[in-house]
Image: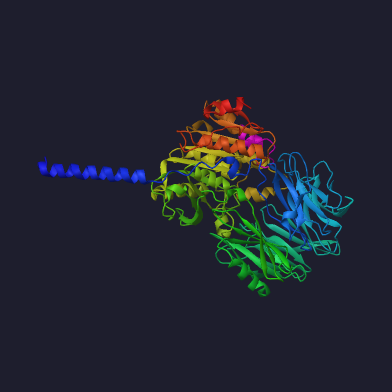
Amino acid sequence: MSLPAPLRAMLVLVVVLVAVSSAGAVSAQPPAPPLIPRTTLFGLGDADVGRGQPILSPDGSRLAFVARVRGERQLFVGPADAVHEARPITAEPAGFEGEQIQWASTGAHLLYLADRDGDEDYRLYALDLRHGTTRNLTPVPSARANVVALSPRFPDEALISISDRDPAARDYYRVNITTGQPAPVFVNTSGFRAIFFDEGWVPRFGLKYAEQGQQLWQRVTGGQWTKLLEHPYDGSDLVVVAVRGATAYLLGAFERDTAGLYALDTAAGRLRLVFADEHADVALQGFAPIFDEHTGRPQAAYTERERGAWHVLDQAYAADIALLQGRSAGVLGLHTPSLSRPRWIISYHYDTRPTEYALYDRERDTVTPLWAADEHLQGLPLAPMHPVTITARDGLQLVSYLTLPPDSDLDGDGRPGRPLPLVLHIHGGPFARDSWGLNPEVQLLANRGYAVLQVNFRGSTGFGKRHQQLAYRQWGRAMQDDLLDSVRWAVARAIADPRRVAAYGASYGGYASLWSIARSADVFACAVSIVGPANLATLIENMPRDWPEDHWANALGEWRTQRGRAELLQYSPVTYAAQIEDPLLIVQGANDPRVVKAESDQMVNAMVAARVPVTYALYPDEGHGVAKRANVASSFALIEQFLAQPGCLGGRAEPFGSALHSSSLTVPQGSELIPGLAAALAQR
């Protein structure tokens, strides 16, 4: 049926007006923000930027911190009241590579751990500030050292554990910080996973794991070990956080869902709940509970669901916490071993600006700003992180975070104006979690034009015991369903372009990325797997020997029987390597002690044998991830060029430039698959 001429003319006019209006709307779109250089986002340039967390000396007079000098990390010490006077006390040409830095009770030494190229065989070092000398306190072939306790009662010593005699058993020593002389305290020939000591560094009780994964706690009396407590394997281990006389403080979900803080009477074997939050676990990682260093009483605990918050347990400090939390919209961090100290290091964490550190003086009631941790990020067009809750197919609530390119969300409501290519950023662990805050890796992806979705799938920590129980033996099953449901959530809300979704992650996140590309090709266009397990049976076989095997058998699956191995192989990405059709980038550290190089080798070899294209990036001087400055630069250059391919996400990318020049990167397979990679390797 034809329309009358006047009506046809009117319709043409309407179409023209709509087209003009649409063209105007397109032209009115703001330009994409400029590409933020990788060296800026990750502090990889030669500028003196990137001061880390300050550490206050026991008497509160001095600060220690790590900062960059000509691009390399160095350890600084200076007056707490005159930070500008701090000077570097290390001068290694390759930079300071220590971790877990802490003041010794002498006030004249700093202790730190260091490994070799990511092998996690940590040794303990003491840096004498008076003489500028460093001593290895654990000069043994294989140390895996850890500081168990420091005390003003024993200022010249540290209570440490090492596993040089038996990789599966830690022995305990008192070591003189000045001379390095060790004295054995407990030689662990009885199969304890850990020994716990009182304030006098006397062994009080120990922990073992039974065959079914349950925790067996034993106390020692008169040299004899007897049963103290048995805790079933139910998704929430009891973890000791402090021992004060006959009372031990533990975290766990004993006869409840969310983990609380408990007091254990080690004489009677009774547990008493001190504090719990109905919506989130009391945190252990990041911000552990704080105790009075004189009385031993708990003072504060931290929980995190969407964002973190402190809970005051000793009302003497309620006004202090209220004052500090009211100073900023950021998440408050407390970095002090005891609230009874006159000075605290505090921090404020944000999503679009660097973490800010300050010195709080309780006696003067003053807060003195110190610095922003990554001042080079200030003023950049960073993207907000939006907390969202996604409902899985079985009704489980998944606390997640969505980050959008700034130019795609003009009204700031957490919804883009059009569907975007999506990176499903999958955290490792899997017994870990994603948190709200500034993440340079997420900012890189958002700046390149991608929506980034981080999901706390079942098994993630912080959300209660049931949230973890639902992940038992669910690798590639219900845990993967949570990820698929999250992508569908983003597609249904016009956040994600269903044709351009990438799986991206490290460790467990690397496994999930491999599984995604192998088993859900209809959902994912490409994947990046960083130190990701490919074979679940060999993963368990090659785990560090001090990891509880029975615990992992319960959580992941049984590998010691033919039937169990068959089931693990059924959910191993290597089994389906020949079915992969889309681009895959695998990144591996050769010295990884957790997910050994053989995992990535298996996957790559299976794909090559099946004539399936894959790019394999191998770092000979890295471990469980990429940490060295030059290698970080090369890895992110590689990743963003991979994602920018038309067959992957097709976003923006900064050219390789000189990013590979000082890197140890090798590409045993598939360098020709990423545009510009072969040429960049040849120019080194």
Viewport quadrant of the N terminus: top left
Between 604 and 652, the one nearer to me in the picture: 652
Left or right: where 415 falls relative to 446: left
The location of residue 519, given as percent across then percent down, is: 49, 39
Left or right: where 494 falls relative to 542: left
Between 219 and 29, the one nearer to me in the picture: 29
Q: How many labels were placed on the picture?
A: 0
Residue 589 within the segment the image draws in magenta? yes
Residue 321 within the segment the image draws in magenta? no
The location of residue 440, given as percent across then percent down, is: 57, 47
Which image quadrant is residue 253 in?
Answer: bottom right
Left or right: where 311 falls relative to 124: left
- The colour scheme applied to this rendered structure is rainbow
Between 499 and 196, the one nearer to me in the picture: 499
Task: Tell me which segment is drawn in magenta.
Answer: 588-601
The location of residue 352, given as percent across then percent down, is: 54, 53
Extreme left residue here? 4
The location of residue 405, given as percent across then percent down, is: 47, 47
Viewport quadrant of the C terminus: top right
Between 627 and 378, the one nearer to me in the picture: 378
Residue 534 higher or lower than 452, as above or below:
above
Q: Is residue 256 visible?
A: yes
Which image quadrant is residue 634 in?
Answer: top right
| Residue found 65% across the figure and 47% down from its top | 49
Which image quadrant is residue 391 in?
Answer: bottom left
Q: Is residue 670 visible?
A: no
Left or right: where 328 falls relative to 31: right
Extreme bottom residue here? 316
